[in-house]
């Protein structure tokens, strides 16, 4: 769905970086360089970004009326 506000493992706030990460990744920049420049250095936080699948648009199709 949406990126969690905090990392599940360490509790560091990470959600504020998601939009910039997604935009820069779509422009073809290396994901490693993006995470390094955003200051996301912990393995658990990096895994949250690299493993996240943005399903909000897919889930929105099943909205109850």
Image (tube, rainbow, N blue to C red):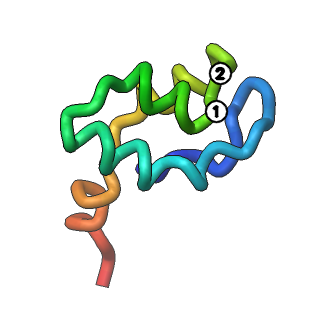
Judge from the rendering whether residue 12 lies leftward or rightward of residue 46; answer left or right.
right
- Residue 19 versus residue 48 in the image, above or below: below
Q: Position of residue 34 (x, y in %)?
A: 44, 32
Question: CA separation, marks 1 and 2?
Answer: 6 Å
Q: Residue at x 62, y 29 (%)?
A: 40
**Where is residue 4 drawn, in percent x and y?**
59, 46
Q: Residue 39 vs residue 28: left or right?
A: right
The quadrant of the picture occupied by the C terminus is bottom left
Count the marks.
Answer: 2
Give coordinates of residue 43: x percent, y percent: 63, 14
Query: Is label 1 in contact with label 2 (beta carbons under 8 Å)?
Result: yes
Secondary element under disc 2, as helix, strand or loop, is loop
User: Which residue shows up at 48% across the image and 48% down it?
Assistant: 18
Tell me where residue 14 sits by quadrant. Answer: top right
- Between residue 20 and residue 45, name the one nearer to us: 20
- Which disc is residue 41 wearing? 2
Q: Which residue is mark 1?
A: 39
The image's mark for residue 56 is none
Within 10 Å of disc 2 (Cα), the crowding (few <14, some 14-19, many 20+) is few
Q: Going 54% across and 25% down the picture, which residue do you hit?
A: 36
User: 42 or 54, which is in the foreground?
Assistant: 42
Q: Is residue 30 left or right of residue 58?
A: right
Q: Quadrant of residue 57?
A: bottom left
For disc 1, the neighbor class at 10 Å (few under 14, some 14 to 19, many from 20) is few
* Image spot of residue 37 (x, y percent): 53, 33
Q: What kind of element bears circle 1?
A: loop
Residue extending farthest to the top is 43
- Figure check: 29 above or below 58: above
Nearest the eye: 19 or 56: 19
Q: Residue furthest bottom?
A: 65
Left or right of residue 47: residue 39: right
């Amino acid at each position: 769905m949406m990126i969690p506000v905090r990392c599940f493992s360490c509790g560091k706030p990470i959600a504020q970086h998601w939009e910039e990460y997604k935009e820069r990744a779509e422009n073809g920049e290396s994901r490693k360089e993006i995470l390094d420049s955003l200051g996301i250095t912990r393995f658990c936080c990096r895994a949250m970004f690299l493993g996240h699948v943005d399903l909000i648009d897919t889930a929105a199709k099943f909205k109850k009326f």
